[in-house]
């Protein structure tokens, strides 16, 4: 059964994640009718891809933002031109039931995942990822190819994180998946060709919402934090069965990249929650991690990430020798969706960007950081406009860290349309060097990436 106007209006009256630019689009589309203000920089040949929660079937007031069916948007640039904008549901069996649009091939009908959190390019494949479940392979024009299990490396009942890390030197894809059965955490490593070469079962205290993790040149760091899976929430009718637990505790697990469960060193930290880090790197034997840290999460709301205190930039310095973590707040602004120059994943970084947030989980400005001295620069899109996560595209393979472009969708409430802005990553206050006006909107979602040559 498809989502109806009446259903959406009734549910949206009580649920902010079903109205405004959180509301789902009602159909797929493709347009080449794009106008551009300014000049698209040379070398931007590829797709800006984003995936968003976009419910296709009926929803109620208790709908959780994180659970909508995945819809992927692709804005293609080539030779200084905006070629087109595609948007399509990820063709899961659930979308077929709701819309009648034929599902793409599935490996196992019982395998979870709808691809609504992130989309990446690796080893010649584009993969849409969700919090749990198998990835979905896409083409650059957002057509769904089908489920992907690394040629049988991932079992249908296993999960893949929405936040794998691509090593910029080796090309490896490092990732994990959390689960709710006897094994709560698995760690995986795929080589540059996309072949799964390592899988490890990692012992944890219980099932927690481990949304992201950290990678350095030599180690990985798991974040075992007190947002716990609670089956009773499902029994009580809650669609998102996670809650804050004051008694679970919080800890970081340090493990060699090629290690296993017996090699993990768990180090306690003060209770908190982190969806996303900027990056991590080795500092001798110590590890430095810049994160967007919350005091609590899922303690207040059952429909979205609503807490009285929004996330702030913190730096964790882990000392395995003393089994301690030094925690320092580095920024006062409420932020989310931190990003770096991806050529420095797992290496020492000095530059990053994040969205400045306001209550309601809406991004109101883009902030650039010198992550060494804490200085910032800001681009504010202006009244009645909100942005989504910015993606960095380097000016060239040998360009200095942070040099290049930031691409971000911006929604205008007065026109109910979106645009993609291109900013000089080193000079945010100068404003966009180009603005690509779209014929529709890109609903607020979570993540995307630039996939060149597609």
Image: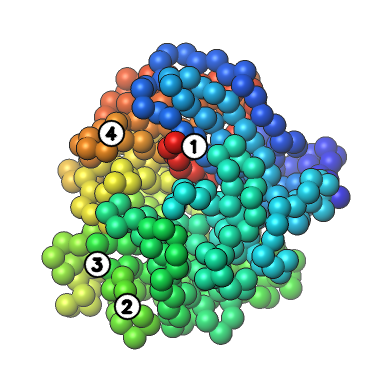
Is 446 left, or right, of 28 in this rendering? left
Q: CA distance from mark 3 to mark 4?
A: 26 Å
| CB atoms of marks 1 and 2 within 8 Å | no
Residue 300 locus on image (x, y percent)? 57, 58
Secondary structure found at label 3: loop
How far apart marks 1 and 2 lie (CA) works out to: 35 Å
Measured in 3D between alpha carbons, the distance from the residue under mark 3 to the one under mark 1, in whole angstroms, is 32 Å
Q: What residue is drawn where x is 43% and y is 19%?
A: 80
The residue under label 3 is 218
Instruction: State which tag comes first along the sequence, 3 or 1.
Output: 3
- Rate crowding at label 3 as few (under 14), some (14 to 19) or many (20 or more) other CA atoms within 10 Å: some
Give me the residue at 55% from left, 20% from top.
Answer: 437
Asked whether 39 or 62 is in front, the reply is 39
Q: Residue at x 71, y 53 (%)?
A: 104
Q: Is residue 409 above or below residue 99?
A: above
Residue drawn at 43 percent across, 46 percent down: 337
Numbered-mark total? 4
User: To which residue does mark 4 refer?
Assistant: 396
Q: Nearer the viewer, mark 3 or mark 1?
A: 1
Residue receiving disc 1 = 454
Residue 113 at x, y percent in the picture: 63, 60
Q: Which circle's residue, 1 or 2, is located before the other in the chain?
A: 2
From where the camera sits, is residue 191 visible?
A: yes
Q: Is residue 170 above or below residue 318?
A: above
Q: Which residue is mark 2?
A: 259
Residue 371, compared with residue 380, is above or below; it is below
Asked if marks 2 and 3 touch (Cβ < 8 Å), the reply is: no
Element assignment for label 4: loop
Give the mark nearest the N terminus, 4 or 1: 4
Q: Position of residue 177 (x, y in %)?
A: 50, 69
Quarter of the figure with residue 27: top right
């Amino acid at each position: 059964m498809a989502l109806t106007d009446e259903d959406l209006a009734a549910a949206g009256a009580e649920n902010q994640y079903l109205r405004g630019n959180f509301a789902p689009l009602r159909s797929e589309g493709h347009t080449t009718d794009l106008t551009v203000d300014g000049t698209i920089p040379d070398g931007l040949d590829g797709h800006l891809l984003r995936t968003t929660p976009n419910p296709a079937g009926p929803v109620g007031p208790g709908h959780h933002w994180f659970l909508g069916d995945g819809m992927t948007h692709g804005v293609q640039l080539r030779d200084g031109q905006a070629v087109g904008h595609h948007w399509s549901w990820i063709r899961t069996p659930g979308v077929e039931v709701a819309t009648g649009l034929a599902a793409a091939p599935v490996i196992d009908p019982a395998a979870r995942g709808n691809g609504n959190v992130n989309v990446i390019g690796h080893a010649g494949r584009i993969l849409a990822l969700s919090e749990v479940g198998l990835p979905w392979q896409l083409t650059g024009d957002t057509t769904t190819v089908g489920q992907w299990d690394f040629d049988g490396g991932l079992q249908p009942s296993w999960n893949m994180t929405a936040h794998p890390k691509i090593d910029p030197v080796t090309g490896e894809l490092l990732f994990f998946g959390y689960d709710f059965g006897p094994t709560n955490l698995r760690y995986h490593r795929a080589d540059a060709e996309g072949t799964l070469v390592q899988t490890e079962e990692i012992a944890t205290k219980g099932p927690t919402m481990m949304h992201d993790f950290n990678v350095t040149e030599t180690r990985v760091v798991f974040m075992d934090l007190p947002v716990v899976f609670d089956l009773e929430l499902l029994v009580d009718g809650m669609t998102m069965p996670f809650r804050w637990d004051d008694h679970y505790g919080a800890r970081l697990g340090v493990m060699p990249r090629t290690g296993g469960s017996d090699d993990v060193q768990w180090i306690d930290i003060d209770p908190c929650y982190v969806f996303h880090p900027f990056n991590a790197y080795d500092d001798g034997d110590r590890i430095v991690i810049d994160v967007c840290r919350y005091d609590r999460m899922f303690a207040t709301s059952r429909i979205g990430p609503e807490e009285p205190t929004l996330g702030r930039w913190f730096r964790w310095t882990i000392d395995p020798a003393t089994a301690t973590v030094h925690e320092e707040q580095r920024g006062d602004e409420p932020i989310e969706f931190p990003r770096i120059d991806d050529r420095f994943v797992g290496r020492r970084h000095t530059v990053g960007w994040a969205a400045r947030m306001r209550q309601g989980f809406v991004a109101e400005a883009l902030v650039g950081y010198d992550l060494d001295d804490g200085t910032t620069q800001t681009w504010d899109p202006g009244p009645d406009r909100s942005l989504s996560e910015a993606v960095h595209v380097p000016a060239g393979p040998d360009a200095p860290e942070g040099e290049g472009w930031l691409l971000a969708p911006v929604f205008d409430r007065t026109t109910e349309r979106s645009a993609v802005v291109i900013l000089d990553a080193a000079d945010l206050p100068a404003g966009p060097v180009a603005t690509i006006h779209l014929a529709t909107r890109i609903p607020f979602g979570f993540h995307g990436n630039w996939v060149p040559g597609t």
